[in-house]
Amino acid sequence: MSFLQILLQLAGGVGYTIMVTVACSLTGVVVGLGVAMLSRIGPPWLRGLLGAFTFIFRAVPVLVLLFIVFFGLPNAGLRVPPLVAMMLSLGVIAGAYLAEVFRGAFDSVDASEVLAAEAMGLSRFQILRLIEIPQMLRFAVPGMINEFTTVLKYSPFAYTVGIPDVMKEAMSLSATTLRGVEIYLAVGIIYFLIYKLLVTGVWALEKRTRIPGLTG
Amino acid sequence: MTLLSVQDLKLEYDGRIILDGVSFDLAQGELKVIMGPSGSGKSTLLRCLNRLATPTGGRVVFEGRDVLGPGVDERALRQRIGFVFQNFALYRHLTALQNVTLALRHLRRMPAAEADERALRQLARMDMQAHAHKYPAQLSGGQKQRVAIARALAMDPAVLFFDEPTSALDPLMSREVVNILHQLRDERVSMLCVTHDLYLARAAGGRVMFLDEGRIHAEGEVDELFGPNADPRVRAFFHQELRQAQTAQPIDAAQPMDQAQPAGPSGPAGLAER
């Protein structure tokens, strides 16, 4: 079995790896945006609550939360499909980190612009939607790429709940061929290529939506 | 006809008195300048009038309605008042044109084409139509301020408030703003302008009020206020501003380096002993 054949064999799992990464990253963006937005405009008690949420979920190891969700919830009568379990663990934890990224990016929006928008007669929600979020998302790009990369590298946990991703393919292949070194080297290359694709994609999007003088 | 009437306006914050009974009227089509040193409460005064700040006492009547009373629609009030800021406060992610159309699109719910047309008219009024599609970072300070004024005018406000419109600008650009004030005054736009810039206060050509420590100490036409019989506080402020303008002169206009007195024993003290 040549190295190329190993790569091709593993390629079958690439789709799942990408699916898990994208699903968990999107969950993270939705959760992070929700938390950061509510913390920005919500009442102090809600801010405290959301602060506790990010604090706790940044502290829990992904695998522990994944097992609690996937193996624990069925005991409470709630069966969770593997992908949903990944989204509820890795995705939500990514959300806690992204909430912090977005909070910092929100703070970079010039306070005088928010004041001008208020003086104009816009509602708080309109200011958030029209002024703060469009700028904040651009400021958040480097932090978001970091977090998406982390999600990609945690995605192999998906094999523990039975998703046949690249890692799962590699383990079965390694068990039947006993050529671990080459196989895991191939896995490394595959993750690098996915990483490269992800980063290139995000930067291309950033470049297309770049505004002169707003970001570096 | 009185457009805006401020009566005994007071604001206390953290036990400090910011505004201590300010009263004045602004007539329809009038330009009034409120001048005073930094920290005199000028900007806060403007913010009380559109409820960005909440005064602790007094009355503000705008277009015949009590602004401070309960049940006032703050957002509707603010849409009647165009606000121009010291640091322009243009939305950096929007072009000049989009800055001007924002309120029309989202507050007036105007269709895009109509809003664009109206915004372009306002930009043309400020001689900025050629820069409509540039972002704020691509404009000079004076150009930014002109876009900000066009943005404030787009909503057809009853009055324009200027909060230190020249303090972030160099003298040449300040003149652009003064020219615009003159243009708008000739068009009978009602304006209230707060500034600590003597040049602006004099050149604007409206009635000037002198605010210090939360009170209006003098009011009059430019020549009265700056003339030989000026209020001592006005004079003190005037002298202080002049001194600052002098010390802010470029280095080459100051004393040449080789004539500077060295410090130490051989300096002035040593000379005095001889």
Image (spheres, coloured by chain):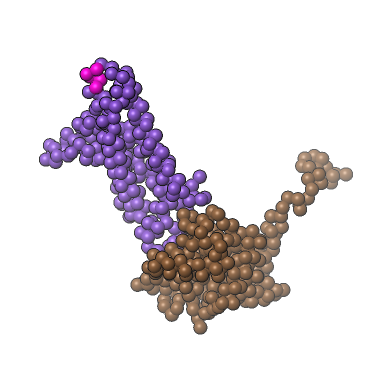
Instruction: Spot the purple chain and give its letter.
Output: A
Residue found 39% across the figure and 41% down from its top = A201
Magenta stretch, overall SS: helix
**Quarter containing the N terminus of chain A:** top left
Q: Visible in this render: residue B244?
A: yes
Q: Residue furthest top?
A: A178
Q: How many marks?
A: 0
Q: Colour of chain B?
A: brown
Query: Position of B102 compared to B138: left or right?
Result: left
Closer-to-camera residue (A65/B172):
B172
Query: Position of A120 compared to B248: left or right?
Result: left
Closer-to-camera residue (A176/B33):
A176
Magenta range: A173-177
Closer-to-camera residue (A42/B90):
B90
Q: Visible in this render: residue B208?
A: no
Closer-to-camera residue (A102/B121):
B121
Q: Could you say where residue A164 lies in the image, as x and y percent from the top left?
A: 22, 31
Q: Could you say where residue B250 lies in the image, as x and y percent from the top left?
A: 72, 52
Residue found 68% across the figure and 75% down from its top = B223
Q: Could you say where residue B77 lies in the image, as x and y percent from the top left?
A: 42, 71
Residue A169 vertical position relative to residue B273 in the rendered view, above or below: above
Residue A138 belongs to magenta span: no
Q: Could you say where residue B130 lies in the image, as x and y percent from the top left?
A: 56, 62
Residue A175 belongs to magenta span: yes
